[in-house]
Image: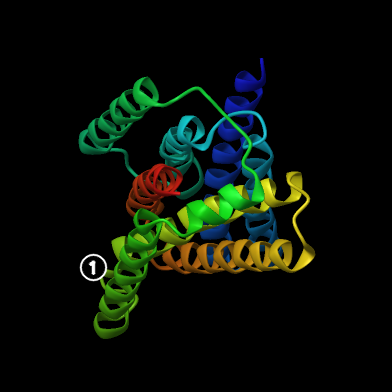
Amino acid sequence: MSYAIGVGLACLASVMNATGINLQRLAQRRGSASLNVLGVALATLCGVVDMVSFSFAPQSLLAPFGAVTLVVNLMLAPLLHGDAIYSLDLLSTALVMAGVATMLSAASPSMRSWSLPELEGLLLRRPFHYWLMVQALMIGFASTVVLRGGSRRRSAAPCFAVIAGLFGGCTVLSAKLLSELLNGGAAWPRVALAAVSTGACALSQLLTLNAGVGRHSSLVVVPVFTATFVFVNAMGGGSA
């Protein structure tokens, strides 16, 4: 039963995220500040829902459900923005969902709580350090492409999406760590550090994604963001 609640919350977070992204794009096209605030609020609250879902199911099981964002975006794009849906869009979505099904079949259904010494040991593991290093290199490379080529060039669209997806994966991992620290009764400096990390990553994701959908079609930005987010989320859970 707890797994069903976790999956339901993960799907709800994905729906909120896709809706928030499209509202932000619509707001920037119309110049509506109130609509943009609503979109930002939904995209922010989805992180809270995601964090709650980790209490009911393991991250490796919930991560693939981030792909629900892609399906909802495919439905909202023509309704809110008049975007045309092509066969390639449908095929790409089908391939992503097939990948999600594969990830779910391999995901471990077990979930456990970690003691504070165990958490510290996980953060000191080399795979986790490699994961952080790859994250930093990819963010740096994508940022360089955007800065050198211009934010409105076609090549910038996937870069915005990749950066947002990378920060999204960091947000999820930080939120999971924060949840474990709170459950384990950790000292407040550690909890505060995890909370600051979660907030910084979430804000960076939000701002980057907002800039991306404000300059490029959500049919380009959201699929790349979702694929990056799901992959980084799953890899982050495995490395730590």
Q: Residues within 10 Å of mark 1 (few under 14, many from 20)?
A: some
Taking the view exactly as shown, the residue that stands out farthest to the top is: 1
Taking the view exactly as shown, the residue that stands out farthest to the front is: 117
Instruction: Say which quarter of the image contains residue 86.
Output: top left
**Depicted 68 relative to depicted 165: above or below:** above
**Depicted 175 relative to depicted 55: above or below:** below
Q: Which residue is pictured at 59% across the width and 31% down the height?
A: 112
- Tell me the colour scheme of the image: rainbow
| Numbered marks: total | 1
- The residue closer to the viewer here, 110 or 147, is 110
Q: Which residue is pictured at 22% across the width and 33% down the height?
A: 87
Mark 1 secondary-structure assignment? loop
Q: Is residue 43 left or right of residue 147?
A: right
Residue 216 appears in the figure = no
Q: Which residue is pictured at 74% across the width and 69% down the height?
A: 189
Q: Looking at numbered disc 1 in the image, what kind of residue is underneath it?
A: Ser
- The residue closer to the viewer here, 77 or 183, is 183
Residue 208: percent from the left, percent from the top?
47, 68
Residue 22: percent from the left, percent from the top?
52, 51
Q: Is residue 155 left or right of residue 136?
A: left
Q: Which residue is pictured at 78% across the width and 64% down the height?
A: 188
- The residue closer to the viewer here, 61 or 27, is 61
**Depicted 111 relative to depicted 195: above or below:** above
Instruction: Say which quarter of the image contains residue 56.
Output: top right
Residue 109: percent from the left, percent from the top?
49, 22
Residue 154 appears in the figure = yes
Residue 211: percent from the left, percent from the top?
47, 69
Quadrant containing the N terminus in the rendered view = top right
Residue carrying label 1: 155
